Image (tube, grey):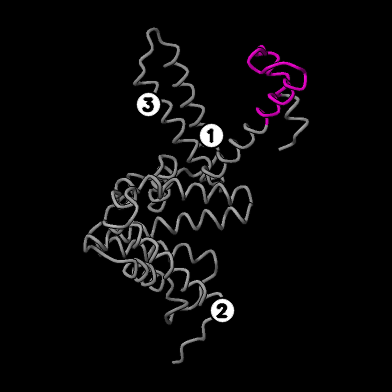
Amino acid sequence: MTTPRRSESETDALAQLDRIIEIMRRLRDPDTGCPWDVEQDFSTIAPYTIEEAYEVADAVQRGNTADIRDELGDLLLQVVFQSRIAEEAGLFTLADVARSISDKMVDRHPHVFGDEDRPQVGEQSGRWEAIKAAERARKGKTGVLDDIAAALPPMLRALKLQKRAARVGFDWTRIDDIIDKLHEETAELRAEVACDPVNQDRVIDEIGDVLFVAVNLARRAGVDPETALMGCNSKFERRFRYIEEQSEKNGNSIHNLTLNEMESLWQEAKSAKPD
């Protein structure tokens, strides 16, 4: 079997990967490297990795391809950085990281790299999950909810928990039932905040229930809750900035506006800047 000739872009990609690996090696050199980079470890770098992943998502949401490119670079740096930390400790290397994901992708696509028939798009998801379940079983993780990272952002983890439970039939049968449940949970929250004195722990618990059901509703509606919330955040920001802009045009400050005046401008924003 002959090896396909690399394209110019692939050759350049390998050269640039070599470059960033060498840059990180020099940054981490205990004698001549950067003091900040040298003192980092897995735990101190992990928050930056999460932040960079979200910045990639934000760039995608905004549709700015230049920013997507740059943010993907920042995320790649995190992979190189943590792999360098691991290599210095004798744990694993960047090559091991690449080998691990390559092996995993080959194993999860037997219809491409093996003898299985190519499935339809709808069938692929089920096969993918079956392969992942087999991988977890080989690691001794046989519980339905095993291997869902506790450090995931709470909304994403709620979504993963619900999807995993739904695979064994623990799921709502109708979306209307979820909406009814959302009304039930908001009623319970209303009752708790009306108590005198308010039990803050119960309020926290009820708000958690409302958010969990809202995630479930998004899932059954075929909507990613993170994407929906990002869109809502952007919409809020656009409308609030309109209030600031209009108040300044009128020679006023938003700090001096009454709630009614701000609400009036908010309604204007909904008409003036369609979302």
First of labels 2, 3 by sequence position = 2
Camera-near label (3 vs 1) is 3
Instruction: Please state if 239 lies on the left or on the right of 68 as rendered.
Output: right
Amino acid on which disc 3 is placed: Asp
The quarter of the rendered structure image containing the N terminus is bottom left
The local crowd at label 2, few if under 14, some if 14 to 19, many if 20 or more residues have their Cα within 10 Å, is few
Question: What residue is pinned by disc 3?
Answer: 205
Disc on res. 8 = 2
Residue 151 lies in what quarter of the image? top left
Please state which of residues 198 and 243 is positioned toward the viewer in this rendering: 243
Which amino acid does the dot numbered 1 rest on? Ile
Earlier-in-chain disc, 3 versus 1: 1
Q: Could you say where residue 269 lies in the image, as x and y percent from the top left?
A: 73, 28
Callout 1: helix, strand or loop? helix
How many numbered callouts? Answer: 3
Q: Can you tell which mark lies on residue 179?
A: 1
Give the residue drawn at x 34%, y 70%.
95
- Determine whether 240 is above or below 22 in the image: above
**Left or right: residue 216 compared with residue 205:** right
**Quadrant occupied by the C terminus:** top right
Inspect the magenta stretch and tell me whether residue 264 lies in it: yes
User: For numbered disc 3, what is the local secondary structure?
Assistant: helix
* Disc 2/disc 3 C-alpha distance (Å): 56 Å
Across and down, in percent, residue 82 comes to 33, 57
Which region is colored magenta? 239-266
Residue at image x 71%, y 14%? 261
Report the mark closest to the observer, 2 or 3: 2
Q: Which kind of residue does numbered mark 2 sit on? A: Glu
